Amino acid sequence: MVKFDTKVNGNTVDATEYNNLILGLKNAITSSGQNIDSSNTQTAKAMAAYSAVSAFYTDSGSANAYILTSIDNFEAPETYIDGMEVRFRAGNNNNMPGPSTINVDGKGIKNIKLQDGTSDLNDGDIVDDKDTILRFDSANDVFLLRQDITARRNAIINGNFDIWQRGASFNTGLGGGDYLADRWRFGGSGATAGNYTISRQSFAAGQTEVPNNPSYYLNWNQTSAPSTPHNLSHRIEDVNTYSGETVTLSFYARLNSGSFSEDIVLTQNFGSGGSGSVTTTIIPGFSPTGSWTKFTGTITLPSISGKTIGTGSYLEVYINIPSSGTWNLDIAQIQINEGSVATDFENRTFAEELALCQRYYEKSYDIDFAPGTVTNAGRILYLVPTGISAAVFETHPFLVVKRNTPSMSVYSPITGAIGKLRNAQDAVDRNGSIGGNKSSYSPTYTDVTIPAGRQLIYHWTADAEL
């Protein structure tokens, strides 16, 4: 196309130049899927179409080396531009910690890094069943990964309290670090926590106090006073998450009885071998009332520049719990999102939320049964082909690849006993264990010889929490 930068301020264009100008507009309009007509809005529509979809690319590369091509007739920029975003569905997961690269429309190979601009991807940061979004950072000459959790509007998993794989009610006796609803931890000492019940509760059908038609909320009923502080917390994988960025925490809460006033904080934990943790208050003096109320807080998290990141780093949301008194507290729809405004709560399907939870915890039991429950629902059956007395047998894949190698337990479906597999025909529990890697597991039988043809049945749990 002829250059027109000298044709302004009174200069004229000849017929060829004019035809080129019109042809350029025509191509922009038709490549956006429109037929030329007499309206005066088609150029604007074409520009809008480019803005909406031209950032999506197809991938023809391999794991750890992604090659992108723009779709249909849309044109990619001539060169990499600072802030340029590309979105694609990868053909392969990145399958190792370490360098990954991308080449967009043949414009050159660039490294893909985490949000700090220097750290390599973790295993499984790019997956083949979800869109990946990258942004070009010209200062570091790399593409930055908007990781799955930060590309979503809500970085908190199970903020709607739909998933309770370990059980739906927990009474006095929890230990510090025990999990309640999936991804939600009880913090503090069980010996000084007083008497309480923490449970899943159902919203009444048709209620309007909390929007988006949630099904459940978390209730903490403290019936005798604790003597030391406790907390309800949620760990978001990777301390890079939101570092140096403005974030907003939002949720609904209601106080049914008692008194409650505590700070809510965010802690950047740099993992084993990393720098000391950094805590920032996001909602000071959280004080719920007798009706459902939305609470929000906004802060800019400290940069992690100059910090050492160890193994298993995370950003943690702490809802501090009073060290005295009693109360009955309800909490629903917890979200943390990028920016200074609390966006609408991100509703995800039950199946998607469960899969996100299963990266950290998975079980063989039916979703409604806590580990150790006497039930055959979800049990695994192994038919002994030859007599065994001590053997590792059969390998099964997990439904979701784990964050790291999980800690596993095996249970008898008939008695609920841990560390036991059930010999179904002889109606007796036998000793066993179970283990595996991030992708699969195998049980081990360690008891008296079982003849061929017997059935061993068992349940299992896999814990890869932070």
Image (cartoon, grey):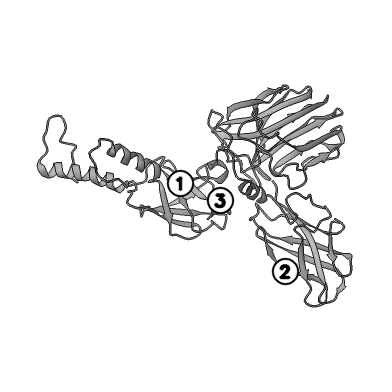
Specify the label residue 129 is tagged with: none
Question: Which residue has dot 1 on it?
Answer: 143
User: Please, is residue 452 above or below residue 255 in the view?
Assistant: below
- Say whether disc 1 or disc 2 marks the residue closer to the N-terminus: 1
Q: Nearer the viewer, mark 1 or mark 3?
A: 3
Residue 255 image position (x, y, % from top left): 74, 25
Q: Nearer the viewer, mark 3 or mark 2?
A: 2
Q: Is residue 85 left or right of residue 114?
A: left
Marks 1/3 in contact by CB < 8 Å: the verdict is no
Q: Residues within 10 Å of mark 3 (few under 14, many from 20)?
A: some
Residue 220 image position (x, y, % from top left): 78, 32
Q: CA distance from mark 3 to mark 2?
A: 29 Å
Question: Which residue has dot 2 on it?
Answer: 394
Q: CA distance from mark 1 to mark 3?
A: 14 Å
Give whichever of 192, 303 is nearer the camera. 192
Specify the label residue 125 is tagged with: 3
Q: Quadrant of residue 415?
A: bottom right
Residue type at mark 3 is: Asp
Please tell me whether mark 3 sits on a helix, a strand or a loop. Answer: loop
Q: Residues within 10 Å of mark 1 (few under 14, many from 20)?
A: many
